[in-house]
Amino acid sequence: MIRNALLILLIATALLVTAGCVAEEPEAPPETPAPPVSLHMFDATNNGESYTFWTGEFIQIKLVENPTTGYSWDMAVPEGLTLKRDEFIAPETEMAGAPGMHVWEFEAGAPGTYTVEGKYVRPWETDAEPAETFTLTIIVEADAAPAPVSRVLEVDETNNGGMIGFDPGMQFKITLVENPTTGYSWDMAVPEGLTLVSDEFIAPDTELMGAPGTHVWLIQGDKPGEYVVEGKYIRPWEADGEPADTFTLEVMVG
């Protein structure tokens, strides 16, 4: 009888030890968050300039293009840069002959020095000089920190619903069409962590009655984090009215 009791005790002890081993599973290592996407934007004002970036950063070039004239941009992107987007954005107007915007986005790949070259040409005029040219030199580094891009990122309606990323202390500028003669104006909400540096309406450079102007906000990213800037195009006295337009931009300060 005593022998049976000892045998039962030994079995119970073994079961407890086994259960303890099963329960003590090693903790999974914490997931490393993906780094924020860094998008640097350039336009005609940067023609002929040079900038330095990390491998994996994204560069956007945006230039005015008017297909109604027969001209279009022929952009040469060298190996080492990966083209991610090549798109013409039509103008937001029905006015005949109005220009649109051509947008290219590419990723900085292998370390090296590259020059993106664009020619504004009529494709069938093979021997003609281009009406305009654009060059941007891109230095890609892998192991050393790139020199800071000391410029203000330009954002407009083509970036609606998009995302930008940059280092703390840098600034970006949002420019949107606004027409106070209609009673509408932009109500822009800038969250904490971003600082509104200036908020200005710029009247149109014309005496034409009812012509729209532009509203410009200069914003600085102070604290690392993810933010959403949201705008509503409204008539302020129509408290329950739906906005005529909206604008959102994700901002990643790393």
Image (cartoon, rainbow, N blue to C red):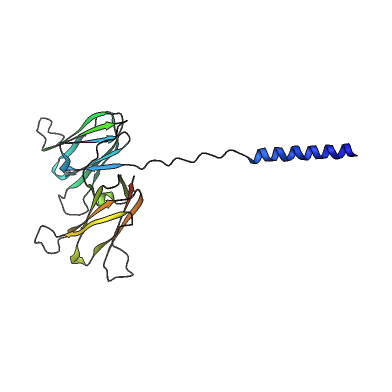
Q: Residue 28, how many percent across, how many down?
A: 54, 39
Front in this rendered view, residue 230 or 7: 7
Front in this rendered view, residue 174 or 156: 174
Q: Is residue 76 above or below residue 70?
A: above
Q: Residue 131, how many percent across, how many down?
A: 10, 38
Residue 111 visible somewhere in the drawing: yes
Residue at position x 12%, y 64% from top?
A: 209
In the image, 93: left or right of 166? left
Quadrant of the image for the N terminus? top right
Which quadrant of the structure image shows residue 146? top left
Given the current orientation, which residue lies at the most extreme right position? Answer: 1
Residue at position x 71%, y 38% from top?
A: 17
Residue at position x 13%, y 58% from top?
A: 204
Q: Residue 47, how many percent across, how many down?
A: 15, 39
Q: Is residue 230 above or below residue 44?
A: below
Q: Is residue 159 above or below residue 48?
A: below
Total labels drawn: 0
Residue 121 visible somewhere in the drawing: no
Front in this rendered view, residue 56 or 208: 56
Which quadrant of the structure image shows residue 113? top left
Which quadrant of the structure image shows residue 50? top left
In the image, 11: left or right of 68? right
In the image, 230: left or right of 74? right
Q: Residue 30, how many percent across, how many down?
A: 49, 41
Quadrant of the image for the C terminus? top left
